[in-house]
Image (cartoon, grey):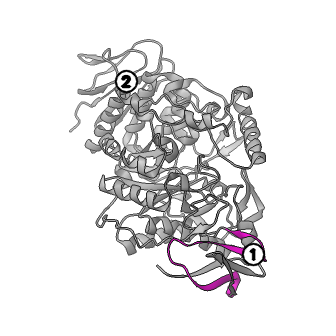
Amino acid sequence: MSAEFSVWAPFAGRVELVADGERQEMTAGKRGWWRSAHAAPPGIDYGFALDGGDPLPDPRSAWQPNGVHGLSRTVDHGDFDWRDAGWRQAPLSEAVIYELHIGTFTPLGTFDAAIERLPYLAELGVTHLELMPVAEFSGDRGWGYDGVDLFAPHHAYGGPLGLKRLVAAAHKAGLAVLLDVVYNHLGPEGNYLRQYGPYFSSRYRTAWGDAVNFDGPGSDEVRRFVVDHAVHWLTDYHVDGLRLDAVHAIYDASATHIGEEISATVAELARELDRPLVVTVESDANDPRLVRPIAEGGYGLDATWADDLHHALHAALTGERGGYYGDFPGLDAVAASLSEPFMHPGAFRRYRNRSHGRRPAGLSGDHFVVCLQNHDQVGNRAHGERIGQLVGADRQMIGAALLLTAPYVPLLFSGEEWNAASPFPYFTGHTDPDLAEAVRRSRVKEFAAFDWDPGSIPNPQDPATFASARLDWAELERAGHDRVLAWYRALIQLRRRHPGLGAGDPRDMVVTYDADAGWIRVERGGVGIAANLGKGDVELPAMAKLLLASADAVRQDGATLHLPPDTVAVGELPGAG
């Protein structure tokens, strides 16, 4: 690779390229672009000096080997032997997604270390790995949602080559890779974009500061920056799709929303590359327009996270009613969110103090990603407790059965499948002490609505908080954990083997329940799932054939299925097949 250096810096009156220890004046071009004839071979450290200042990282830096405040380094993306020609990811209708955080997934916390666990994930039966954000962020530990050098894989994880090796190895193991990307805000430390141009808008505010400028003056190049970023991961790193973080916090009044522009661009790229690509989104708006076809006035995205099933399952399993869980009362909410991904769309929500959502009429279940746990729902608790730590393995296994037989796209959070004992609290590694203290105070304030003791909340900056989140893979062989792992494996195998259990039409499902007695029964695709969350034994109509039971005490006696408290059974229905 040998190209010229260029940078969009409309706020600067003078731009110098700083490379090889020398400064070279760059030439001003149209619409704020600056260019230099200096060759850019791979491995060159460089930066851009604006109006005589110190060199800053390139906004499109491909590598930040020395962190967010260091110089950028050029990368030749053509110099990698992929060997994945002909690779095709499974469709979302058949998907089981596995979300993981590179830094805590293994003791070393690197891309290369994660490769060692790919055979395990393939055997587990998942189809897609979803990586929490890997773009360069401040420090050497963090969730990744405060990235600032968006084109550069984090140096502590292994940089560009490490990520490429992981994606290539995943494809070889039969696993697709989805990458979480953040376009609603950027992190505060190391964020030099404001010095370059109008990347941010003061017209809107997010929970994390100024919103990205998608519709104001100068926004054309900001939109180009984001769309090019999406294409970058799909082409230079061969990832199979993106998950856009918190699109409800993307403010864009343009005639074409940035989500739609990304969707259309990725669809065209998929045709050019002749391989399927997907774009999923996180949104708490319960708005089906995100996934409706562009021709029908939607954004054309492939799937949206639908959190209502998580909230309903969590409230039913734990009995918690604080914060938003107060809007999800027991088995009533579980039944409603199984039957429709957006529970009671358009109804009043007390937590929000307004009506919320819209009915996703006519949309199939593969447009909705659901979970029992994910990084937010675990990590946004005061102590980062997983569901098994809150309710025990038996009740977690009930939640897993209802999730993995639901007509939507299931997502597992790494370690969930063996009821990992490690929590997943929020952690950071900012090098700015004032920012670190501000994050700690904000964290305490955030939990006021949930009545959690502010004095007990772990300090995100404490290295011990991060260390506590590392998975302990030795647990796989320990009693109790091995039982839960076997349960998850059996459920995933059943979902993949049974044609009626993939993501499909929620209307092809019957849900019955007794909130007072605490039992719920789901029938779909010739399979029945019966669970008892009550305090006493229950008797329900028998399955034609019992396929899975969470405890030996579950039994069938003629026409009756006997379920003790905190048990679940899965079986073939009479007349199925």
Identify the image quadrant of residue 152. bottom right
Between marks 2 and 1 in the image, the one whose residue lies nearer the viewer: 1
43 is within the stretch colored magenta: yes
172, above or below 19, in the image: above
Q: Name the residue at 42% across, 37% down.
A: 403
490 is within the stretch colored magenta: no
Q: Which amino acid does label 2 sit on?
A: Arg
Residue 197 seen by the camera: no
Q: Position of residue 562 (x, y in %)?
A: 33, 16
Q: Do the residues bearing badges 2 and 1 touch, measured as CB atoms within 8 Å?
A: no
10 Å crowding of disc 1: few (<14), some (14-19), many (20+): some
- Residue nearest the observer in this picture, 20 or 109: 20
Residue at which label 2 appears: 478
Q: Is mark 1 on a helix, strand or loop?
A: strand
Q: Which amino acid does label 1 sit on?
A: Leu
Identify the image quadrant of residue 167. bottom left
10 Å crowding of disc 2: few (<14), some (14-19), many (20+): few
Q: Earlier in the sequence, mark 2 or mark 1?
A: 1
Identify the image quadrant of residue 461. top right
Residue at which label 1 appears: 50
Q: Which residue lies furthest to the front in this view?
A: 21
267, above or below 96, in the image: below
Q: Which residue lies furthest to the left in this view?
A: 577
- Residue nearest the observer in this picture, 418 or 304: 418
Magenta-colored span: 29-56
Q: In this view, does 558 lie to the left or right of 111?
A: left
Q: Position of residue 22 (x, y in %)?
A: 67, 78
410, above or below 540, in the image: below
Q: Position of residue 481 (x, y in %)?
A: 39, 26
Q: What element carries label 2?
A: loop
Q: Where is residue 568 in the image (x, y as percent from the top left)?
A: 37, 24
C-alpha separation, residue under disc 2 versus residue under disc 1: 58 Å
